[in-house]
Image: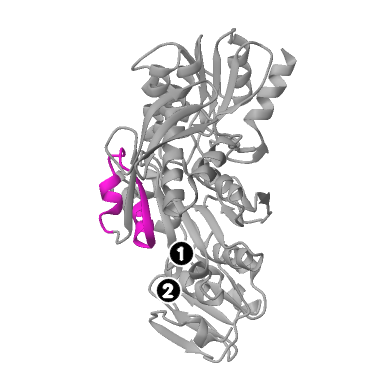
Amino acid sequence: MKLEKLLKNLDYIELKGNKDIEVLGLSINSKDIKKGYMYAAIKGFRVDGHSFIKDAIEKGASLIVCEDIEGIEYNENIAILKVENTRKAVSYITRNFYDNPTNKLNLIGVTGTNGKTSTTYFLEQIYREWQKNIGLIGTIEIRENAKKIDFDFATSTTPDTIELNYLFDKMLKDGVDNVIMEVSSHALELYKLEGCHFNIGIFTNLTQDHLDLHKDMESYCKAKSKLFEMTDYAIINADDKYAHEIVKNSKAKIYTYSIEKESDFKATDIEYFMDKVCFNVEIEGKKEHFILNIPGKFSVYNALGVIACCVVSNIPIDIIKNGLKNIKGVSGRIENIKNDKGFNVIVDYAHTPDGLDNILKAVKEFTKGRVISVFGCGGDRDNKKRPIMGEISGRLADYTIITSDNSRSEEPNSIIKQIEEGILKVTKNYEKLVDRKEAIKRAISIAKEGDTVLIAGKGHETYEIFADKTIYFDDREVAREILKEL
């Protein structure tokens, strides 16, 4: 693509060098640069991409996008573009490179602390029931029409802006014109979605998480709210205390859902069971009955956001009902590890205070005996939530085993100690086992008939991250192995 077309509608500070170049590809990683590529130098949290500009030029880059052009040696085959914010500029450049793919998609974004993955999977199921081509981009995987597609970059909730627009373009070419995606606060804060157009945005909830990046809840909320400045319709959880703040700057048409407050889509007559929830919602003056084969109050909230989104999208009520009823569950979300021991073993991704609180309350609703909780907290992440989660487990579980969970560069015992500070406020019914496998084994070995063992924090993840290595580790597989050994 010619440089002039690539820079359309982009504000920049200075353009030096050859203004008639052709750009053949895009990258923010100098290792991936090929002849004719654009290299964007991003100032990261740990590494400054400006340090690799020389490498990119030697590899044949035709365009360098950066915030500091001092000292850059270039030739007649290269253009140097100075911008105020490289991340933001790359978003616009990438959209131009792929001819603004989000303008041609029915794009639905789901944001919030908890419930994003479940909400996107529920929506995918309903669109499949409606016999529509549907793409999904999220934490667990990227899919086209329920078939996983593998990419090396699918390692975060929201891929970077180049990867994302590549995906949008690929899906369009594959005939997929509806895309549902999880939208993280990191993606919004770091301009990954700058300039994208969403038909519908869904807000699930906002509770403490990611304060290592956002510093406080006000900043976290502000980051999340950015999604609703680029949507036509906003579907908002009215029961969440941040609901008003999330949409106060939005020009979208707003619809609300709730269990407690009055809203456009309010759940009534809720019945909770071990393996499902049933509830009614009044839609266009008629009471409609819904069944979801996933237990818990939080599942009702996730379903309500989905129902509202589908009604706004003019999907027939019967299709919505059948889609929700046919959902088999989401990987690593309140996933039951079947066994013949007479007790339940549940694996769940809950890794925030609110997530742990929700899953423990849901488990207690169907557990006849004790609830045994196994969890830890990630290293190099928000450490303020650690004692809070300890207190929650101590208060809601009958017994807690504190363990490791992706300790990264931190000392596992230090993380556990911070969790312990919280649990000691409410109980002494706990123990500490640093080795996660041993902790799971201990929990299962002490479980009796009627009990539930909840293994929280990792869910679908298949790895354990330490300071010096990353190993294969799947809570579900470990639990099955231990159950088989008993």
Residue 70 appears in the picture as rendered? no
Secondary-structure class at tag 1: loop
Q: Is residue 236 magenta?
A: yes
Seen in the picture, residue 453 relative to 456 is either above or below; the reply is: above
Seen in the picture, residue 174 relative to 75 is either above or below; the reply is: above
Q: Residue at x 59, y 55 (%)?
A: 134
* Amino acid type at image mark 2: Glu
Q: What is the span of residues highlighted in magenta in the rendered image?
A: 223-249
Rounded to the nearest angstrom, the CA distance separating label 2 from label 1 is: 9 Å
Q: Badge 2 local density, few (<14 within 10 Å), some, or many (20+)? A: many
Which residue matches tag 2? 67
Q: Is residue 137 left or right of residue 202?
A: right
**Residue 79 placement (x, y as % from top left):** 53, 85
Please, which residue is most extreme toward the right here?
485
Q: Is residue 97 left or right of residue 114?
A: right
13 vs 5, nearest the viewer: 5
Pointer 2 and pointer 1: residues touching (CB < 8 Å)?
yes
Numbered circle sitting on residue 43: 1
Q: Is residue 247 left or right of residue 84?
A: left
**Residue 61 placement (x, y as % from top left):** 61, 79
299 vs 356, nearest the viewer: 299
Q: How is the image coloured?
A: one colour
162 vs 260, nearest the viewer: 260
Secondary-structure class at tag 2: loop
Q: Badge 1 local density, few (<14 within 10 Å), some, or many (20+)? A: some
**Residue 454 placement (x, y as % from top left):** 54, 22
Q: Residue at x 66, y 76 (%)?
A: 59
* Amino acid type at image mark 1: Lys
**Quarter of the view holding residue 168:** bottom right
**Residue 167 placement (x, y as % from top left):** 60, 63
Numbered circle sitting on residue 300: none
